Image (cartoon, rainbow, N blue to C red):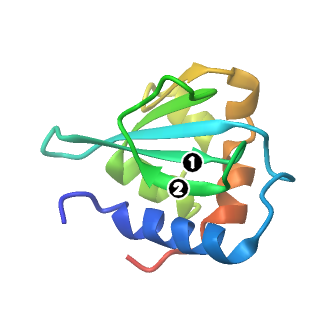
């Protein structure tokens, strides 16, 4: 496994499959575009607008928000060891699209990603 965050995305997928409605989170499609330390990129699309599901996808066309972040920084963000504002201000988290929705990303991740994911 070349992406340390992959288990987090698997847990998000399971959480969405078992939780039912996600309409209270945000009515948007968010793409997480991650880059690992080998320089490879991989993207996951979190659809909270239509289906309430997470899929691997390189299609960013319908995304309301694209978040580009390093693999390990994403892991730190989900596990509460860093926050989105610090990552953004240091240039480690880049946002394309609806910036207002990006302000809620930590809240969204706390609801769909289990706290302190075991990796």
- Residue 46: mark: 1
**Mark 1 Cα shell of 10 Å, populated few (<14), some (14-19), many (≥20):** many
Q: Is residue 1 visible?
A: yes
Q: Earlier in the sequence, mark 2 or mark 1?
A: 1
Secondary structure under the numbered disc 1 in the rendered image:
strand
Image quadrant where one finds the N terminus: bottom left
Which residue occupies the extreme right position in the image?
A: 24
Number of numbered markers: 2
Image vertical order of residue 84 relative to residue 107, above or below? above
Q: Nearer the viewer, residue 61 or 103?
A: 61
Task: Name the residue: 87% across, 53% down.
Answer: 24
Image quadrant where one finds the C terminus: bottom left
CB-based contact (under 8 Å), mark 2 and mark 1: yes
Residue 71 on image: x %, y %:
34, 49
Task: Name the residue: 80% across, 51% down.
Answer: 25
Task: Name the residue: 59% across, 61% down.
Answer: 80
Image vertical order of residue 29 relative to residue 108, above or below? above
Q: Is residue 8 left or right of residue 35?
A: right
Residue at mark 2 to residue at mark 1: CA–CA distance: 5 Å
Q: Is residue 115 visible?
A: no
Q: Is residue 114 left or right of residue 36?
A: right
Image vertical order of residue 62 relative to residue 48, above or below? above
Residue 44 on image: x %, y %:
43, 47
Q: Residue 116's image quarter?
A: bottom right
Residue 30 on image: x %, y %:
59, 38
**Mark 2 Cα shell of 10 Å, populated few (<14), some (14-19), many (≥20):** many
- Residue 103: mark: none
Residue 6 on image: x %, y %:
35, 63
- Residue 54: mark: 2
């Amino acid at each position: 496994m070349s992406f340390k965050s992959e288990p987090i995305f698997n847990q998000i997928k399971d959480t969405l499959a078992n939780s039912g409605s996600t309409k209270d989170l945000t009515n948007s499609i968010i793409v997480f575009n991650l880059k690992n330390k080998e320089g490879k990129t991989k993207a996951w699309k979190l659809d909270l607008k239509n289906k309430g599901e997470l899929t691997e996808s390189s299609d960013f066309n319908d995304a309301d928000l694209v978040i580009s972040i390093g693999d390990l920084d994403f892991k730190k963000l989900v596990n509460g060891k860093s926050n989105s504002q610090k990552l953004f201000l240091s240039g480690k988290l880049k946002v394309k699209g609806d910036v207002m929705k990006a302000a809620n990303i930590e809240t969204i991740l706390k609801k769909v990603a289990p706290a302190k994911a075991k990796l």
